[in-house]
């Protein structure tokens, strides 16, 4: 009987130490989990921006295919630094007016991306090259550029 009570006295406070160690391990695990969640959200947003850039490029290529004479005539060509002029037309529009309106609308879509810029060049043979660049969510100092070439 005496042996049992002396063993119990020697183990007093040991469960409190076990609980403290378990809390430390749990808190480190939760910190790691929150870090993984943050990285996942950042990568998900980056993928979303890449998808938006792909959709925007597809939009201008479809617009150029709908107005092939304007595209092969060079009316869709615009560089990163150029700003499209504002054009309106009432009734029937020329291919140049349609191209100017398309480029203006397209540039507005591209600028919705973080620091988004776009460039279009079309050859007389109908080979189009569309470039879109934007700031990536994973590294704000890193500009990503998506280039697509298509035959109109």
Image (cartoon, rainbow, N blue to C red):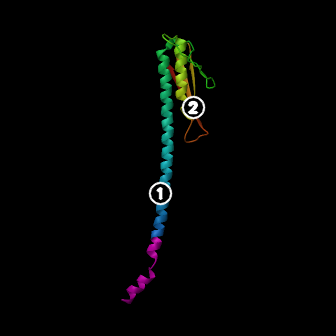
Prevailing secondary structure of the magenta residues:
helix
| Residue name at image x 46 percent, y 16 percent | 66
Q: Nearer the viewer, residue 7 or 31?
A: 31
- Helix, strand or loop for disc 2: loop
Residue 34: in sight, yes or no?
yes
Residue assigned mark 1: 30
Magenta-colored stretch includes residue 147: no
Residue assigned mark 2: 116
Q: Determine whether, in the image, residue 10 is placed left or right of residue 103.
A: left
Where on the picture, by quarter, is residue 144? top right
Task: Find residue 91 and report its horizontal and vertical position in percent.
Answer: 48, 11
Task: Find residue 39 and report its horizontal and vertical position in percent.
Answer: 51, 47
Task: Find residue 133 and report its horizontal and vertical position in percent.
Answer: 57, 31
Crowd tier of the residue under label 1, counting other residues whose Cα lies within 10 Å: few below 14, some 14–19, many 20 or above: few
**Residue numbers of the magenta segment:** 1-18
| Residue name at image x 48 percent, y 69 percent | 20
| Residue name at image x 48 percent, y 25 percent | 58
Crowd tier of the residue under label 2, counting other residues whose Cα lies within 10 Å: few below 14, some 14–19, many 20 or above: many
Q: Earlier in the sequence, mark 1 or mark 2?
A: 1
């Amino acid at each position: 009987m005496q042996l049992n009570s002396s063993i119990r006295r020697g183990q007093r406070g040991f469960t409190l130490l076990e609980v403290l160690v378990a809390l430390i391990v749990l808190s480190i695990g939760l910190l790691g989990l929150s870090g993984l969640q943050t990285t996942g959200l950042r990568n998900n947003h980056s993928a979303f921006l890449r998808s938006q850039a792909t959709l925007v490029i597809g939009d201008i290529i479809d617009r150029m295919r709908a107005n092939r004479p304007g595209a092969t005539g060079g009316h869709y060509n615009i560089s990163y630094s150029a700003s499209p002029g504002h054009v309106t037309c009432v009734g029937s529009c020329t291919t140049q007016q349609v191209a100017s309106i398309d480029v203006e609308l397209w540039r507005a879509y591209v600028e919705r991306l973080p620091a988004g810029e776009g460039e279009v060049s079309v050859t007389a043979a109908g080979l189009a090259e569309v470039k879109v660049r934007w700031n990536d969510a994973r590294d704000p100092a890193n500009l990503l550029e998506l280039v697509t070439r298509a035959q109109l």
